[in-house]
Image (spheres, grey):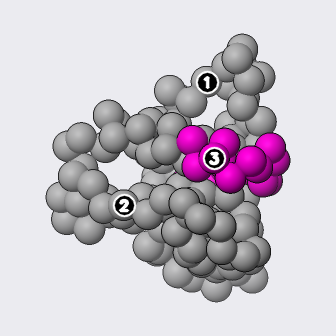
């Protein structure tokens, strides 16, 4: 069952792009590859969990993919991952199940009488060659106050 949580804002560095919704499934993996390349070029061997933020605006999607970053580094766009209230579900296993998690979170938002906010995010806590070991926190911002 998803949890209502408070997410703290975080300064991040990575890649920010607006992409067509119809090609998002092809383009998002390319953005992750670019982030990995930028980390390699910067000689960064660990930067905290990679995080993806998604915001839909009509037929486009703003994508922010990055890592916690406290000072600018060449090759990284600085951005803030906004804080706020969110409904969050931890997902164990392959990433191909994430679209179903978003449908479930949306249903749960409505069932709880909450209002969906601006951002959806995925925090990749543990990603392995054996995708059954993956741990991803998926959350959707809500505008209602937590009690």
| Few, some or many residues within 10 Å of mark 1 (<14, 14–19, 20+) | some
User: Above or below — where is 55 with respect to 28?
Assistant: below
Which residue was labeled with disc 3? 41
Q: Is residue 51 magenta?
A: yes
- Provide the secondary structure element on which disc 3 rests: helix
Question: Which of these two is toward me, 20 or 46?
Answer: 46
The label on residue 83 is none
Q: Residue at x 21, y 52 (%)?
A: 20
Q: Position of residue 89 (x, y in %)?
A: 67, 48
User: Above or below — where is 130 with respect to 29?
Assistant: above
Q: Position of residue 113 (x, y in %)?
A: 51, 71
Is there any visible trace of residue 96 in the rendered image?
Answer: yes
Cα separation, mark 1 vs mark 2, equals: 25 Å
Q: Residue at x 56, y 30 (%)?
A: 95
Which residue was labeled with disc 2? 17
Q: Position of residue 3 (x, y in %)?
A: 72, 58
Is there any visible trace of residue 53 in the rendered image?
Answer: no
| Few, some or many residues within 10 Å of mark 2 (<14, 14–19, 20+) | few
The magenta-colored residue range is: 37-53
Q: Position of residue 107 (x, y in %)?
A: 46, 52
Cα separation, mark 3 vs mark 2, equals: 20 Å
Q: Residue 11, located in which quarter of the rendered image?
A: bottom right
Which residue was labeled with disc 1? 94
Q: Residue at x 44, y 45 (%)?
A: 31
């Amino acid at each position: 069952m998803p949890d209502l949580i408070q997410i703290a804002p975080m300064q991040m560095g990575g890649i920010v792009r607006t992409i067509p919704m119809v090609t998002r499934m092809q383009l998002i993996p390319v953005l992750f590859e670019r982030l990995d390349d930028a980390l390699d070029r910067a000689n960064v061997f660990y930067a905290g969990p990679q995080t993806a933020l998604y915001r839909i605006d009509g037929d486009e999607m703003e994508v922010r993919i990055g890592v916690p970053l406290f000072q600018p580094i060449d090759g990284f766009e600085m951005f803030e991952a906004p804080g706020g209230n969110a409904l969050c579900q931890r997902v164990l296993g392959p990433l191909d199940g994430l679209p179903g998690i978003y449908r479930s979170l949306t249903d749960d938002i409505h069932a709880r009488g909450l209002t969906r906010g601006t951002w959806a995010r995925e925090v990749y806590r543990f990603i392995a060659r054996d995708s059954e070991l993956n741990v991803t926190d998926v959350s959707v911002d809500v505008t209602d106050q937590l009690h």
